[in-house]
Amino acid sequence: QGAALYYANNPDFGANFRYYLNDVPKTLKQQRTEREKKLFEDKKPIPQPTQEELLQEQNEDAPYILFTITDLQDNVIRKITSKPSKGISNVMWDLKYDSPMPVRMSEVKFNPVPSSGSGRGRRSSGGMLATPGTYKVRMDLIVRDEKTTLSEPVEFETKMLNNATLERDDREDVLAFSAKLSELVRVMRGSQQ
């Protein structure tokens, strides 16, 4: 009695960035539909959008949040995008560098927040693991090609779990080797495209 099988998914691995947004920017189409709805409620005539306005709406990229992770020397380690939503949200960094693989365009339109997972058109799982140490993260909001800084760089520290069978003292050497190997893979993959 009192014993039962319980299982759950493991928590996401990496650094968790939690943030709060008071307002979410609207796209041109959302702004137009809100104006039209108000005019409809007020029983006023709704103006027909011009061809240029409709084309601008169609070609507009959705607003997104850009997290830029850098080391203490301001070398960019990874850029992560997230769809802005009102209230408290969080995004995970899997403690990996950007993938060295070339970009494959699966869609004609730019998608700042692609679906996660693997396969064609999906977000890459990243490159090599970052070494334990101090990093910085900056948060920017991108709306219609305009960047607004939401947070100046904030320092955070990553630590190694104490579960390694053999300790390594040469982490920087391993990182340098991994960087050379990633560049080689990137060049080879790029030449195959």
Image (spheres, grey):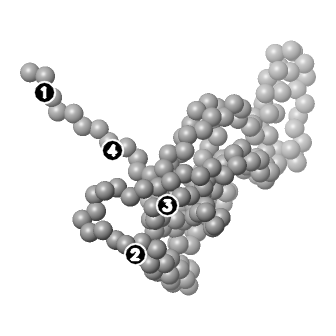
**Residue type at numbered disc 3:** Gly
Question: Residue 29 location in percent, x, y?
Answer: 77, 38
Q: Looking at the image, is mark 2 or mark 1 earlier in the sequence?
A: 1
Q: Looking at the image, is mark 2 or mark 4 earlier in the sequence?
A: 4
Residue under numbered circle 4: 10
Question: Residue 170 location in percent, x, y?
Answer: 40, 75
Q: Is any atom of residue 125 visible in this view?
A: no
Question: In this view of the protein, which residue sits in the foreground, 29 or 180?
Answer: 180
Residue under numbered circle 1: 3
> Which residue corresponds to the image point at 53% horizontal and 58% vertical from the top-left?
134
| Disc 3 and disc 2 in contact, CB within 8 angstroms | no
Few, some or many C-alpha atoms within 10 Å of disc 3 (few <14, some 14-19, many ≥20)? Answer: few
Element under label 3? strand
Q: Is residue 9 above or below residue 193?
A: above
Q: Which mark is residue 170?
A: 2
Q: Which mark is residue 133?
A: 3
Query: Of the residues tagged 1 and 3, which is closer to the observer?
Result: 3
Query: Of the residues tagged 3 and 4, which is closer to the observer?
Result: 3
**Residue type at numbered disc 4:** Asn
